[in-house]
C-alpha cells in the first residue's frame, strides 16, 4: 500500500510531461485490469479490483484534462493531431 501511495501520485505528475515531450502523433493507453462494484482488498489480493466509484472519478478526471478516445479510434485520433 505504501508503494501505491508513492507511485500513483508520481505517475500522475509524470504523465503530462511524457505526453508533452513525445514528438509526433502519439496516444497514451491506460488499462485497468479489474473494475468491480466494490474495491478489492489489497491485503488479500495481488491485483485488487478498483471500485466502480473510483473508476468513474478517474474517467471524469481524464475527460477534464485529456481527449479520451476508444481504443478502436486511437489510430484515427492520433493521425488527426
Image: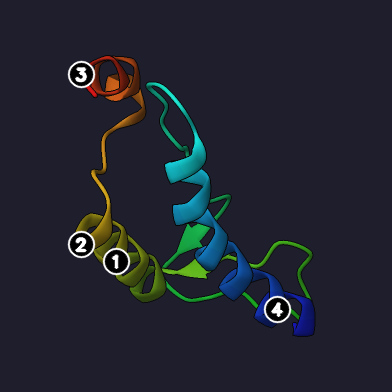
Q: Is residue 3 above or below residue 47?
A: below
Circles 3 and 4: CB distance less than 8 Å? no
The x and y percentages for residue 53 are 34, 75
Q: Nearer the viewer, mark 3 or mark 2?
A: 3
Helix, strand or loop for disc 1: helix
* Residue 78 in the image: above or below residue 9: above
Tell me which label, 3 or 2, sits earlier in the chain: 2
The disc at residue 6 is 4
Q: Nearer the viewer, residue 22 or 32?
A: 22
First-in-chain label (4 vs 1): 4
**Which residue is disc 3 drawn over?**
80
For the residues bearing labels 3 and 2, Cβ distance under 8 angstroms: no
Tag 4 secondary structure: helix
Q: Which residue is rendered at x = 27% and y = 22% of the image?
A: 73
Q: Is residue 30 visible?
A: no
Q: Look at the numbered disc 2 and give the secondary structure of its residue.
A: helix
| Residue at image mark 1 | 61
Distance between the alpha carbons at the discs numbered 4 and 2: 24 Å
Q: Are marks 2 and 1 in contact (CB under 8 Å)?
A: yes
Amino acid at each position: 500500500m505504501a508503494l501505491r501511495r508513492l507511485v500513483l501520485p508520481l505517475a500522475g505528475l509524470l504523465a503530462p510531461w511524457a505526453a508533452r515531450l513525445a514528438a509526433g502523433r502519439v496516444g497514451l493507453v491506460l488499462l485497468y485490469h479489474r473494475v468491480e462494484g466494490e474495491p478489492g482488498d489489497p491485503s488479500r489480493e495481488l491485483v485488487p479490483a478498483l471500485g466502480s466509484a473510483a473508476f468513474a472519478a478517474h474517467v471524469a478526471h481524464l475527460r477534464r484534462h485529456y481527449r479520451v478516445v476508444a481504443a478502436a479510434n486511437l489510430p484515427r485520433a492520433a493521425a488527426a493531431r
